[in-house]
Image: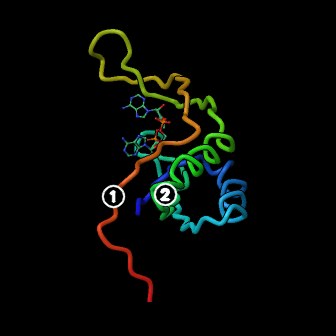
Amino acid sequence: MKLVIAIVQDDDAADLLDILTENGFRVTKLATTGGFLKSGNTTLMIGVDEEKIKEVMGLIEDTCKTREQVVTSPSPMAGSTGVYIPYPVEVEVGGATIFVVDVDQFVRF
Ligand code: 2BA
C-alpha cells in the first residue's frame, strides 16, 4: 500500500474530494498552510493499493488547476537606508504537489 499526500489549492479541494470518493478512494482532508505564501491550502491523505496510483494521480491532475497568485514582497530601497517598500510579485501555484510514500503497515480496527 502507498500513501499519496497531495497538497492542493483550497478552490479545487471540494471537487477533488467528491471525485475521489465517487471513484471509491478513501481520503482524509487536512487544512494546511503554505510556508511561502502563508495562506491556506488543503492536504489530502489517500491510502491506495499500488496499482491504483496512476488512477488517483490522473483524477488529481484532471481536477486541480495551476493559478497565478500575487504576493507582496518587501524590497529594500536603493542603498542601505533600512527602508523597505512593498512590491507585488506573481508566483505560479501548482495544481498539486504530490508525495507518494511507502506504507509499512496499514491497520483498521
Ligand atoms: P507555498 O509554500 O505557500 O508556496 C506557494 C507557491 O509559491 C509555490 O507553488 C511556488 O510557486 C512559490 N514558492 C514556494 N516557495 C518558494 C521559494 N522559496 N521561492 C520562490 N517561490 C516559491 P507550488 O510549488 O505549487 O507549491 C504549492 C504548495 O505546496 C506550497 O505552498 C506548499 O504548501 C506545498 N509544497 C510545495 N513544495 C513542497 C515541498 N517540497 N515540501 C512540502 N510542501 C511543499
- Identified by mark 1, the residue type is Asp
- For the point 33% across and 58% down, the residue is 102
- Name the residue: 60% across, 46% down: 9
Q: Which residue is drawn at 41% across and 48% down?
A: 99
> Where is residue 39 shown, x and y percent of the image?
52, 48
Residue denoted by label 1: 102
Q: Which of the two residues, 68 or 55, is positioned nearer the viewer here? A: 55
User: Alpha carbon of mark 1 to alpha carbon of mark 2: how far?
Assistant: 22 Å
Q: Looking at the image, in which quadrant does ligand 1 appear? A: top left
Can you tell which of label 1 and label 2 is closer to the viewer? 1
Q: Name the residue under label 2.
A: 32
Amino acid at circle 2: Thr
Can you say which quadrant of the picture contains the C terminus?
A: bottom left
Identify whether 98 is placed above or below 83.
below
- Residue shown at the point (38%, 15%) measured from the top left: 77
In the figure, is residue 9 to the left or right of 74?
Answer: right
